[in-house]
Amino acid sequence: MAFKNIVVVGASGMLGQALTGYLRAKGYTVFPTTSETLNLLVTEDEMKEKLEPFQPEVVIQCAAFTNVDGAERDPDLAMAINKDGTHKLGLASQSLGAIFAYISTDYVFDGLKNEPYLPTDRPNPINTYGLSKYYGELLTSEQLEAYYIIRTSWLFGIHRNNFVQWVLDQARSGGTIKAAEDWIGTPTWTGNLVVAIENIINSGVYGTYHAADSGAISRYQQALQVCHMAGLPTDNIIRVNSADLALPANRPKQSPLACPDLAVPSWETGFQAYLLQYQHQLTAS
Ligand SMILES: NC(=O)c1ccc[n+]([C@@H]2O[C@H](COP(=O)([O-])OP(=O)(O)OC[C@H]3O[C@@H](n4cnc5c(N)ncnc54)[C@H](OP(=O)(O)O)[C@@H]3O)[C@@H](O)[C@H]2O)c1
């Protein structure tokens, strides 16, 4: 364990909660912040004031405006949080001597490559969310010296609603599951991602990384597999084309991430672990 004090920004989110719990269990001293305690809309100086008492060695930026369709409706807010907020937080972290780790997304890519994207591939975002996250990456890499950009994709985890949980909930209640057959990506369990993040921040090799589980799959196939593995009926899963969903934001058609710097587990392994947590949560409620 190389670091003592780690600040997790966006610690109330799906990834932030998993990361905080994991790093604490590994013995790190973690200072979690939320939009209440460290908002990305305040000035760089205010961010510095909030961070300083933690004496951070690493700041992990998990906070984001993550509503992809919402970003088309409110691009100014998406940019203010994902681009400007990340920029200010990175500068504030650097001024305190902390390493900055920025969690980014497969949505920085246009989805036209036809094979998994490498960390060195050129981003070309096709929606506002992707653009705002890409600007966050650019400002991080151009203005900071000690940084990690960690792109991940199609997250699922126990702490907040997500596609996998929605599929399970719908299948259990007999609801309809419309899932696109023309979106292909790499589902990633937050429980696997937190291990990858720990390995990356301890590597000492700054730069851009991909951290996703293995196994490219369409949303439709994923919904089928989730229900199969959970022993739930698949009758209500309807294969659709993404255009039929008429969503405000375009999504990349194929955005699987290649992770050349990491040994990554399969998303199905992650799903098995997630399913136990999901079932435990059901019986506890
Ligand atoms: N979910 C995915 O499928 C996916 C895929 C690829 C990459 N990512 C990236 O992974 C990271 C984590 O995603 P997630 O799914 O865990 O996100 P999430 O569950 O939506 O959580 C977002 C977090 O950001 C915080 N936040 C929002 N606005 C803020 C503001 N103005 N100031 C400070 N904090 C603010 C939220 O805090 P409050 O709860 O206090 O509002 C929350 O802690 C993000 O950077 C996202 O872009 C996610």
Image (cartoon, rainbow, N blue to C red):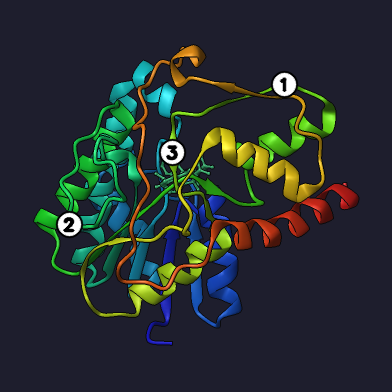
- Front residue of 230/157: it is 230
Which numbered marker is on residue 176?
A: 1
Q: Quadrant of residue 100?
A: bottom left
- Front residue of 279/9: it is 279
Which numbered marker is on residue 137?
A: none
Looking at numbered disc 2 in the image, what kind of residue is underneath it? Thr
Q: Is mark 1 within 8 Å of ligand 1?
A: no
Whether residue 12 appears in this view of the structure is: no
Q: What residue is rendered at 25% in x and 35% in y?
A: 112
Could you tell me how far apart the alpha carbons at marks 2 and 1 are, in whole angstroms? 39 Å
- Does residue 211 sit above or below 205 in this rendering? above
Q: What residue is rendered at 51% in x and 67% in y?
A: 265
Q: How would you rate the neighbour count of disc 1 (Cα within 10 Å): few for under 14, some for 14-19, many for 20 or more?
A: some
* Residue 268 place in picture, x, y as percent: 61, 57
Q: Identify the mark nearer the N-term, 2 or 1.
A: 2
- Does residue 163 sit above or below 8 in this rendering? above
* Residue 228 place in picture, x, y as percent: 74, 45
Which residue is the site of mark 2? 120
- Does residue 78 sit above or below 93 in this rendering? above
Circle 1 sits in a helix, a strand or a loop, which is it? loop
Looking at numbered disc 3 in the image, what kind of residue is underneath it? Ile
- Does residue 144 sit above or below 98 in this rendering? above
Which residue is the site of mark 3? 184
Q: Identify the mark nearer the N-term, 2 or 3.
A: 2
Could you tell me how far apart the alpha carbons at marks 2 and 3 are, in whole angstroms? 20 Å
Could you tell me how far apart the alpha carbons at marks 1 and 3 are, in whole angstroms? 21 Å
Looking at numbered disc 1 in the image, what kind of residue is underneath it? Thr
